[in-house]
Amino acid sequence: MSEVDHLKARRIRKRDALIEMGMDAYGRRFPDVMPTAAVRKAAGPLSIQPGQRSELRGRVAGRIALLRVMGKLAFATVRDETGTLQFGLSKAELGEQWSVLELLDLGDIIGADGVIGRTKTGELTIWADNLTVLAKSLRPPPEKWHGLTDVDLRYRQRCVDLFTNPDVRDVFRQRSSIIQAIRDCLIKEGYCEVDTPVLQPIYGGAAARPFTTHHNTLDIDLYLRISPELYLKRLLVGGMERVFEISRNFRNEGISTRHNPEFTMVELYEAYGDYQVMMERVEQMVSAAFEASTRTGVPQGVESIEGEVRRLEKEKGAEAAAAYAREHHLDAYRQAAQGIAQGRLTAVFQGDVLDFTPPWPRHEYADLLREYAGVAMTDVQAVRRKAEELGIGHAGKDDAVVVNDVFDAAVERHLVGPTFVFGYPAAICPLTRRHPEDPSIALRFEAFAAGMELGNAYTELNDPEIQEVNFKRRVAGEGDETMAVMDEDFISALEYGMPPAGGLGVGIDRLVMLLTDSPSIRDVILFPLQRPQPARTS
RNA sequence: GGGGGUGUAGCUCAGCGGCAGAGCACCGGCCUUUUAAGCCGUAGGUCCUGGGUUCGAUUCCCAGCACCCUCACCA
């Protein structure tokens, strides 16, 4: 029997003892629970003195995070979604229920009624006169101070990660707020939210390898979408002039700190718009997302880092405190907080201060290429030499592809502050309208921040014949699995006439990373894809 | 796929070519105002897996697996 089994067995015995006592170890409806934060708020104006109790009663429920039993008196620190609160439990007041306390473990979910008071040391406390077990926990929670830190385990047992690490919960609360802000922002602009197929007989709209699956009854192979683009454009044809989808996309590609095989994008199309309009939409959406999360997140960050620095100073000295401040980018947080105080949209990402205040700088692709790679976009020879120098294979590749490889390698990481890049080579943008005066240039921009691609937008191509030619060229492309499928139905839709439009996709996961200072995309996806582990015996 | 790192108790981590360690959690004892409560005592191990070197390997070597970082791939 492993140790987990031992620990579990002990807890099972305690649970059975509870049941024998007539206490339902898994509880039932527990009405009128006050969030711990609400109790704190309610207690504030009462100005209860240390050692005093108020008249105010409260009912609180949550998971036992800490438990300190001292003979006939115990304190339990209980955590709910809004924070923590201490329960005071005395044998004298609990009477028979004291034996319930003796059967409690860390991690149990309990509820209590009692008066709100303060202990001698001033800690806000509910002095329980009624104690209920709402769910007996059979598995031991992680270490109470460090919590779960093993990254692998954190993702694999996200539920444990969430209930032990409040910061993790906070990231996902912010993610929710950010998505809501984006949704509200687009609805306000007259957009209609839609859902288009995830299972697609023909994939398209991006250059990526798809996941394949099969429908049994129809006996057909289907693809999980790599992009909703071709369906959203059909809606433009259908007369839905402003549409967006918060779209889970699936790309059968590598995994990294910036790539998860399934990821979330907001993709939108606006009839009679163009990519210039889409730049404003990016600024609007990101501003809204910023207001919903980082506007308060940064000052809170400063506060919590400073608090920890003060604690370390006292306990471990100035050196440890300074190291912590450096490691957690206190200076950057202070700078960003100052920016926010002055009305700017400043965030911190991994020690860099990013200023999202619109308008974002706009730079030409060719200029950036000249600045950071030292080559002219049109000088094919020089570009290929540069590719060589950067160690990028270019043999047999299209000129435009090599140009873009060089751009990615030499320029991208320099784009730290939010930036729009426009003037892309047309050859790498098959669904994009070309510049009326220079057909080698596509009417496209990409948004970058922290060296990451954040969004991508076009003046959409609505000429069915050019579209068909572009499709065919890609289908013919050798050794290229991407965009290799001809979508006749999409062409026929364009033949009915699609209004000229701007289209935009913004990576939600990456935006959440930037606005929550999360170094890996896995930190902002609740259940990132991982290789399954052999079944555990415990 | 290339390079680097990690894998030791439920959790967080030390350690070492010669009986496997700490803190927390667990169990027992004392304790009615604690704050990561404290003090005393106990129990808990496939040292990731497989092979090799060795009298002896958790430690050294090789291979594998998993995860992390990085590069490549990736609109």
Image: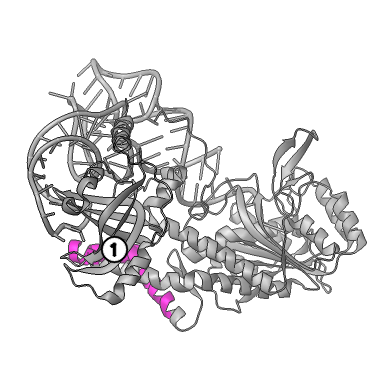
In the rendered structure, the answer to whether residue B23 lies left or right of residue A416 reads: left
Q: Is residue A145 visible?
A: no
Q: Give the labeled residue for mark 1.
A: A323
Secondary structure of the magenta portion, mostly? helix
Picture quarter with the C terminus of chain A: top left
In the rendered structure, the answer to whether residue A300 lies left or right of residue A246 reads: left
Quarter of the rendering containing residue A14: top left
Segment colored magenta: A311-338
Quarter of the rendering containing residue A446: bottom right
Quarter of the rendering containing residue B57: top left
Q: Position of residue A469 (x, y in %)?
A: 88, 55
Q: What chain does badge 1 belong to?
A: A
The residue closer to the viewer here, B59 or B11, is B11
Q: Residue lying at the far bottom in this picture: please name it.
A: A342
**Residue A137, relative to residue A404: is it above or below?**
above
At horizontal 83% and vertical 68% (from top left) the residue drawn is A439
Q: Is residue A393 visible?
A: yes
At horizontal 49% and vertical 58% (from top left) the residue drawn is A172
